[in-house]
Amino acid sequence: MMEAFEILTTASLWAAVLRIATPLIFGVLGALICERAGVLNLGIEGIMTMGAMVGWLTVYWGGDLWTGLAMAVLAGMVMGWVHAMLTVPLGLSQHVSGLGITLLASALSYYLYRLWVEVGDLPPTIEPFLPWAVPFLSDIPFVGEVLFTQTPPTYVALMLVGVVAWMLARTPMGLALRMTGENPHAVEAQGLNPVRIRIWAVMVGSGIMALGGAFLTTAAFNSFFPGMVQGRGWICIALVVFASWRPGKALIGALLFALFDAFQLRLQTVVEGVPYQLFLMAPYVLSIVALILVARRARVPEALMQPYRRGER
Amino acid sequence: MNAGAVLELEGITKRFGALVANDDVTLSLQKGEVLALLGENGAGKTTLMNILFGHYAADAGEVRVEGKPLPSGKPRAAIAAGVGMVHQHFTLAGNLTVLENIVIGSESLWKLGMDREGAERKIRALSVQFGLPVDPAARIGDLSVGERQRVEILKALYRDARILILDEPTAVLARPEAEQLFTILRGMAQGGLSIIFISHKLHEVMGASDRVVVLRGGKVVAERATGQTNAAELAELMVGRAVARPKRAAHEVGAPVVVAEGLSVSSGGGMALDRVRFEVRAGEILGIVGVSGNGQAMLGRVLSGLARPDAGTITFDGRDISRITPREAVGLGIGRVPEDRHAEGVVGDLAVWENAVLERLRDFARWGFVRRRAAEAHAAGLIARFDIRGAGPATRTRLLSGGNMQKLILGRNLAAGPRFLLANQPTRGLDEGAIAAVHQELLMARAEGAAILLISEDLDEAVGLSDRLQAISKGRLSEPIAAEAVDARRLGLMMAGVWETRDAV
Ligand SMILES: Nc1ncnc2c1ncn2[C@@H]1O[C@H](COP(=O)(O)OP(=O)(O)OP(=O)(O)O)[C@@H](O)[C@H]1O
Ligand SMILES: [Mg+2]
């Protein structure tokens, strides 16, 4: 028991929490932007896979790491565009389209990877992002090690939380986006085009999701392999509900999940006689419990998943 | 074509499939004028206004504001030209604040910040100038319908509207609120605003407009200066024939069918119903009058089996029904006409025949399969018997006009010959012709011995139909009085919660 507690006081655990949380933060922010505009994007799992593959491949082919991230965003936006076209102007089922995008984007990623990359016994690797210690700030004991010796994409993710929160709450665009998720008819009656707003929201949201995938191959690991997104997209969908569609709470949710995950990994080494599968399960079980406790009070965007068609009554 | 007109519609035609909703409509509006647009349900009034505002693109015709043509199908252009619209169904986001609902669309989407203080100042100034008090920080979902209506008007004024269109602004307002609204609108017109409003209530049209345009079947059939016409003529122009609301004939009432005793329901900290007692007898209409929001909705919910009372009993033929489910209510022969026909009356995306049999699916099913032929025949029967226009059994119910949707709901209930019928605001939003038809049906059910509980905000309707009346105020119900014994003053007092019990019946 003491040992378990001691783990919680180590800076390395908390640094790992931020690292594990980074792809989730990107994913949950992306999903949140889509849903705030009224579109559920179950393409997230595939879009993250796509981002992972495209980001890695760009670097493998000689691009620099930042170009890799940019290409991942672009690929995500393309997939988002397909989802948006199917669900917004055509008004098809968002569930079906989203799952279709996940299947399409994942399969396409694996296919192109096999097509373009020679794979030997081990998958080829790239030089990934290295931790970058922020001058001065990283010298602060404990906090410095946790917060300011991360890889650059983690800093981007943390800043993005603030940017998205501010955008949603403070800017005319954020207001238009939220209103589109609440009542697209009201948006149109005020002279804006809810269809266009939804399409853009889905594209931008998908681009951000793809960054989450790209983080895996350009910072957390240095190679791409099938199945590496490992359900993180689905976790993000649940985290959006956990967060009541708010960016700040989404950050907390992502960190909480990452904490469970980092903690169970370390617990496995100190607690003996318990099957390790139970530990692996723990973050998911705890997430479900947290979701049950929190989500009952969540306020869903009223027009979420409701197609909007012009000139129809 | 018309000197001084701020707004001209010329030759507007709009088709939905085979249906011609607007047929070569031409109309103009002068500066500072209040124009009333009148017509039956489905006459094409909303469609015309939606074209003017750019929600729909017309198939033919042109809209000109101050002489300049408006591009079709662009609300943004209409707003920029100074047109503001208050829609028949509110276009507000319930989870957002008043301020957010008002300012959206007024600023460039690419600005990095919003001027909330400036917006709030402007809203407050408009509130004071036009007498439309609202709290900019309040959440729309927490406001009453009257307050939401004000927000809708402020939305238009915030964008500097010079032409204001109001599509049935008073359909959900109680009479005092409606009168207040028209006072405000008259003030606006004197201040130079030009106004078009749509209403089915002829006294409002007579009282508030300068000119009346009547639409029937998508065509302009008449245009009158308000001073040179009267309500009876307008009603006739609208429907194409003379309409008169049917009169209640005196007849014997039977034994009590539904009796409520000490009925209480608490909700949200207060009492929605507070020790309510009433009885409805066979062959009688009991009218419950009152300003909406005083417990009518909860009374309707309890009687339909959608809410449970905390205390008290309701009996139906002596049997306790205070805890029944909606299905049991149907089984017992209790008919219900819900307050909100779109939300609770019909499933808009299903066909008319599906809605016609949904309540009693068991009667139209065999071995778990729907007997579609029988169900469609049943629906066709309802359509013929209750004169539901513009519909076949296969029509999507959403496409029916309000009046015809209401006839479908009534017909579905009355066809089964109910012992008890709950009619909650049965004629809200309906035109004179449809109101007369609904009244006729209710009186016929009464003549056949049904016990009817009529909840209505429309005093003329309640007094005209009911044998006895009770007023509801803050969840409490007055003692009943005979319809013959009422006068306007006494009813007004009763609705304000002041009642004495001297001639209770
Ligand atoms: N989007 C649409 N698609 C198909 N038909 C429509 C559509 N909108 C309106 N209609 C039909 O056009 C006709 C005119 O409808 P409209 O809503 O303009 O009537 P209205 O005069 O406003 O009636 P009410 O008094 O009930 O509001 C109706 O028959 C209606 O069913
Ligand atoms: Mg209408």
Image (tube, coloured by chain):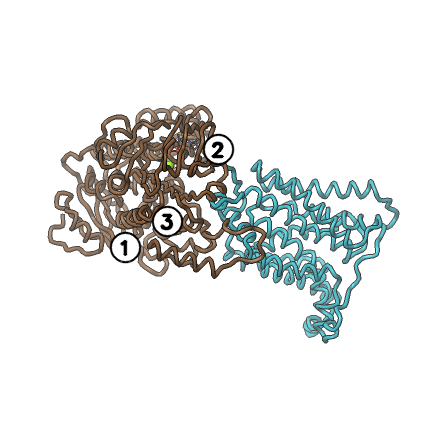
Chain colours: A cyan, B brown
Q: Are marks 3 and 1 on the same chain?
A: yes
Q: Is residue A177 left or right of residue B308?
A: right
Give ligand 2's quarter of the image: top left
Q: Furthest-left residue in view? A: B502
Residue position marked by numbered label 1 in the rendering: B475
Q: Which badge, 3 or 2, comes first in the chain's sequence?
A: 2
Element type where label 3 sits in the image: helix
Respond yes or no on whether mark 2 lies under 8 Å from ligand 1.
Answer: no
The chain letter for the residue carrying disc 1 is B
Contact check, label 2 and label 1, Cβ < 8 Å = no
x then y, percent, for residue B248: 17, 35
x then y, percent, for residue B343: 40, 42
- Give the crowd class for mark 1: few <14, some 14-19, many >=20 residues within 10 Å: many
- Give the crowd class for mark 3: few <14, some 14-19, many >=20 residues within 10 Å: many
The chain letter for the residue carrying disc 2 is B
Label 2 to label 1: alpha-carbon separation = 47 Å
Of tags 3 and 2, the one toward the viewer is 2
